[in-house]
Image (tube, coloured by chain):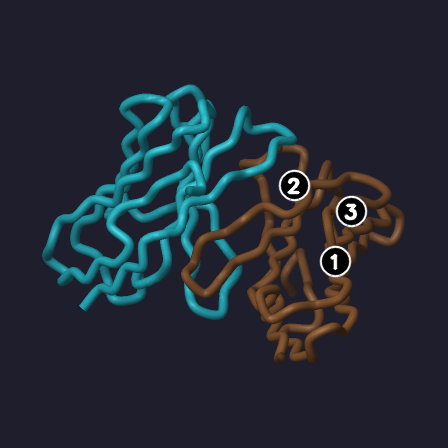
Chain colours: A cyan, B brown
Amino acid sequence: ETGVTQTPRHLVMGMTNKKSLKCEQHLGHNAMYWYKQSAKKPLELMFVYSLEERVENNSVPSRFSPECPNSSHLFLHLHTLQPEDSALYLCASSQGVAYSPLHFGNGTRLTVT
Amino acid sequence: KNEVEQSPQNLTAQEGEFITINCSYSVGISALHWLQQHPGGGIVSLFMLSSGKKKHGRLIATINIQEKHSSLHITASHPRDSAVYICAVMGDGGAQKLVFGQGTRLTINP
């Protein structure tokens, strides 16, 4: 049990589909993150929410839409994705955004066909 | 050139060997993380350090701020240590400004 749970673990979707990734943390943290990990590339930050407010949007295309309804839940809504969006999407949480260790979920492996 | 460079990219060793993974960075940092990623994808934070040395079990992490370099050592390596080890540096913006290395894939053979 990592304290950060992501669902689903695997997702295959067509380019015209709409789907959502879910992340839930049970650690009492107040900051949550979405990261993207593509093959042979370093982890890339996508979004940061602190106290349920988005504080970072790292030039992510609008076909990715995050939602943070409360400090324990984070969603990533997906629509009209491209095959190059296929990657591992990782959620993380921390207590504050400054000088605090990250706790990661196991990720959702997304394949866009 | 990535702001965070790790070496080697791949490392294969026999059980029991002493392992060293290196991380060099080119930016000013407030802290450096070492992370472990197993084949299933999940990432575990091993260390967060800003100076000196930290030890946890068979793992040791060191950092030299002047040289912009950190090392992760594993003593008495075991097949269960097989994973990707990732170095990440935290800039002045805190955790939201983490910059990641590409990772070192470690395989320990029995």
Vertical side of B44 occupied by B94: above or below? above
Q: Position of residue A49 (x, y in %)?
A: 41, 29
Circle 2 SS class: strand
- The C terminus of chain B - image quarter: bottom right
**Of label 3 and label 1, which has the lower sequence position?**
3
Q: Can you say whether A63 is above or below B5 in the image?
A: above
For the residues bearing labels 3 and 2, Cβ distance under 8 angstroms: no
All told, the count of numbered labels is 3
Q: Are marks 2 and 1 on the same chain?
A: yes
Viewer-closest of B55 and B28 = B55
Tell whether B45 sits left or right of B8.
left
Check whether the beta carbons of the residues at disc 2 and disc 1 lie within 8 A of each other: no
Q: Amino acid at mark 3?
A: Lys
Are the residues under marks 3 and 2 on the same chain?
yes
Say whether disc 2 or disc 1 marks the residue closer to the N-terminus.
1
For marks 3 and 2, the one nearer the N-term is 3
Residue assigned mark 2: B90
A105 vs A41: above or below: above
Please tell me the numbered disc located at residue B55: 3
Report the front residue among B109 and B54: B109
Q: Are marks 3 and 1 in contact (CB under 8 Å)?
A: no
Q: Inspect the image, locate mark 2, and give the three-letter code of the amino acid beneath it.
A: Met
Residue located beneath label 1 in the image: B72
- Seen in the picture, residue B24 relative to A104 is either above or below; the reply is below
| Mark 1 burial class by Cα count in 10 Å: few <14, some 14-19, many 20+ | many
Q: Chain of mark 1?
A: B
Q: Which callout, 3 or 2, points to the residue nearer the camera?
A: 3
Residue at horizontal 69 percent and vertical 73 percent from the top: B8
Could you tell me which chain the residue with mark 3 belongs to? B
Q: Amino acid at mark 1?
A: Leu
